[in-house]
Amino acid sequence: MPLLEVRNLNVVLQTQRGPARAVRDVSFTLERGETLGLVGESGCGKSITAMSLMGLLPENAKVTGSIQLEGRELVGLPERQLCELRGDRIGMIFQEPMTALNPVHTIGHQVAEPLRLHRGMSASAARKEAIALLDRVGIPDAARRVDAYPHQFSGGQRQRITIAMALACGPDLLIADEPTTALDVTIQRQILELVRGLVAERGMALILISHDLGVVAQNVSKMMVMYGGEVVEDGPTAPVFANPMHPYTLGLFAARPRLVGPRGGRLATIAGTVPELVDLPPGCPFAGRCRLTVPECHVTMPPPHEISPGHHARCIRLDTVAAEKKVAA
């Protein structure tokens, strides 16, 4: 039995313009120790998918499908029982540590809180463990700074504190939602190395959400490319990077800055913008922005087509893509 099994997950959000399908028929499994990356532009459904796993969606959200944690169904689970899972079996590193941390409580109080709630530790025992966790994630002089407040730390240190909170109870699944946003590249590398080391050390499963393809390439074993709330391409990371096939994935790869090549050149871009969720076409969500769009693309979303073992793409123009790649080679 996999640690996490998601089947036909759909999330509909109620907006002023009507219902918006933020996540559409997403399915995947995750074993203990496995790492999964979610890739795509902002607004493609990555964070909503993660929030669905945590049960942290808006009250007006309608969720259908199945989310099972070692066989236990999470969709429809009462809030009290979801609270028992959050911070215990499922931990989350949020994108912005200053909004994830409470400014009126010390960091020691916040790191110790899940230990008191889920492990029943006394205040003194939880404080001692909080100091050990802060030291483990690289907070200098943790025993002295445990009573400091979030604003007294740098951005990189605040992110380390949120990691300590997420790992306090030794979760089975860790979700990292853009954990290095707004950090310089040196701190970014340190944070990712810390997360990677802790995941390997504790045997956790990891879901890493990022728009940075380099981060995904270096930190996860398999990946899903999302657009318009749907998974348009997925598979083991190495084969997807070696042979991307969906036009959207190819667009993302082409837009990456390169260290080699002529200076002063313009970066490739994907035409158009991500449509509002209420304006998505009935067929492929990328139809219209894709230069290979034909009328059939607007009719229905094609099923996954296997490119290689475990590697799938959902596009009716894959033959054309393959032919163009062959000519380019």
Image (cartoon, helix red, strand yellow):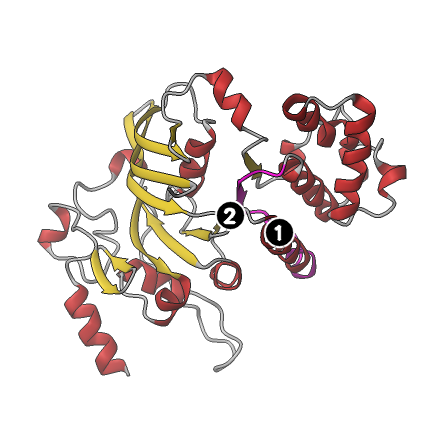
Q: Looking at this view, is 135 or 241 the one in front?
A: 135
Q: CA distance from mark 2 to mark 1?
A: 9 Å
- Whether 49 is drawn above or below 12: the answer is below
Q: Nearer the viewer, residue 49 or 151?
A: 49
Numbered tag placed on residue 195 in the rendering: 1
Q: Is residue 100 left or right of residue 144?
A: left
Residue corresponding to mark 2: 206
Which residue type carries mark 2? Answer: Leu
- In the depicted structure, whether residue 115 falls above or below residue 3: above
Horizontal side of residue 162 vs 145, given as left or right: left
**Whole-percent x and y of residue 269?**
38, 62
Quadrant the C terminus occupies: bottom left
Which kind of residue does numbered mark 1 sit on? Answer: Val
Instruction: Tell me the crowding category of disc 2: few under 14, some 14 to 19, or many 20 or more residues within 10 angstroms, Cα based.
Output: many
171 part of magenta stretch: yes
Query: Measured from the top left, where is residue 2 in percent x and y?
Result: 39, 43
